[in-house]
Amino acid sequence: MSQQPSAARVVLVTGGAGFIGSHVVDLLLARDCHVIVVDDLSHGKRENLAAHQDDPRLQLVVVDLRDDFAAALAGLPRPAAVVHLAAQISVPRSLAEPLLDLDVNLRATVRLLHWAAAAGARRLVMASSAAVYGDPARMPVSEDMCDRPAAPYGVSKRAAELYLHCLGPGLGVATAALRLFNVYGPRQDPGSPYSGVVSQFMARALAGEPLTILGDGGHTRDFVHVADVARAFVTALDAPGVDGLIANVGSGHATSIRALAEAIVAAAGSRSPIVHAAARAGDIVHSLATVDRARAALAWQAETPLAAGLAETLAWLR
């Protein structure tokens, strides 16, 4: 990818070769930004950015944010804004390796904030997670509900939010955190252990293999399409008065895992049976976002109906 600078506004996207990040990159380039992607490619893929490989407005820097990323970025155009998506996203891994989770999700975020301030960036928008809520006492969850994260992953995301809120004003960087619910869509790798249930069910349905539901299938999730999520991040880069914003990014609709499995089997024209296994200890029962704050602060709401999003994702997987 070309290293030529651009006169367009520069935005740095960490994790920009990943599932969500590459969709953010697509949208930024469509809006004529110059995009610098920082990704260690541990989960991100060059092919997610292949459509832009000859675009001089895109630069890919392969580096881990735990390493000397400042040296890797030296000499490149300075960003006006940062979208921070790079993260350790596995709840089980955070339980097994909490220090890794701390380093990737908290320490690296604080280092990035300081670098952004020194580079002259005036806004940083971070991907947080519905995991900060743990297993809440009531539904839907609003941003001001008591935090009860059930694993180090949720703790690290909540701590990163607090660090941004505490340090951003003194550094002159406006910060915002978007709490993502269950994101799905094209480029979500069904073979990854960190992938969501949508892509995993789809891969099995297309292969004619059983779809295994952990538990009775009555537990619910708030599924939001990746294109809607990307639009939330890009909108947050320009929306006025969002310093310190924490906002849920979800569809605002609950879908049971059983209903999801049935919809995927039907959409795929599959004969895959739906089977059940023991529920996994620690899994939350219900998850559903209120999205009033995102609607008010960003004039944003999810626009992709689940049926249409599933059809698009299936078409990409086939």
Image (cartoon, rainbow, N blue to C red):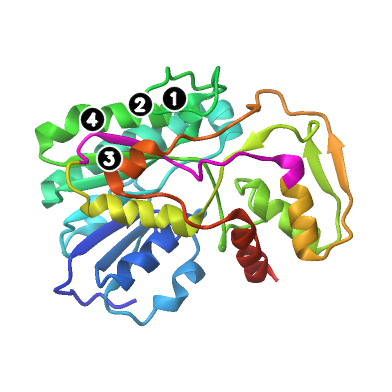
Quick one: quadrant of the N terminus?
Answer: bottom left
- Dot 4 lies on which element? helix
How far apart, in angstroms, are the residues tagged by discs 3 and 4? 8 Å
Q: What residue would you read off at disc 3?
A: 176
**Tag 2 and tag 1, C-beta contact below 8 Å:** yes
Quick one: quadrant of the C terminus?
Answer: bottom right
Q: What residue would you read off at disc 1?
A: 155
* Among the two numbered marks 3 and 4 on one chain, the one whose residue lies closer to the N terminus: 4
Which label was assigned to residue 191?
A: none
**Tag 3 and tag 4, C-beta contact below 8 Å:** no
Which label was assigned to residue 159?
A: 2
**Mark 1 or mark 3: which is in front?**
3
Q: Which residue is at 73% across, 28% downward?
A: 280
- Dot 3 lies on which element? strand
How far apart, in angstroms, are the residues tagged by discs 4 and 1? 15 Å
**312 inside magenta stretch:** no
Q: What residue would you read off at disc 4?
A: 165
**Mark 2 or mark 3: which is in front?**
3
Magenta region: which residues? 242-259
Q: Position of residue 223 (x, y in %)?
A: 57, 46
Q: Position of residue 184 (x, y in %)?
A: 57, 53
* Among the two numbered marks 2 and 3 on one chain, the one whose residue lies closer to the N terminus: 2
Q: Which residue type does callout 4 highlight? A: His
* Among the two numbered marks 1 and 3 on one chain, the one whose residue lies closer to the N terminus: 1
| Crowd band around label 2 with a 10 angstrom C-alpha radius: few (<14), some (14–19), many (20+) | some
How far apart, in angstroms, are the residues tagged by discs 4 and 2? 10 Å
Q: Is residue 213 above or below residue 156?
A: below
Q: Is residue 195 above or below residue 164?
A: below
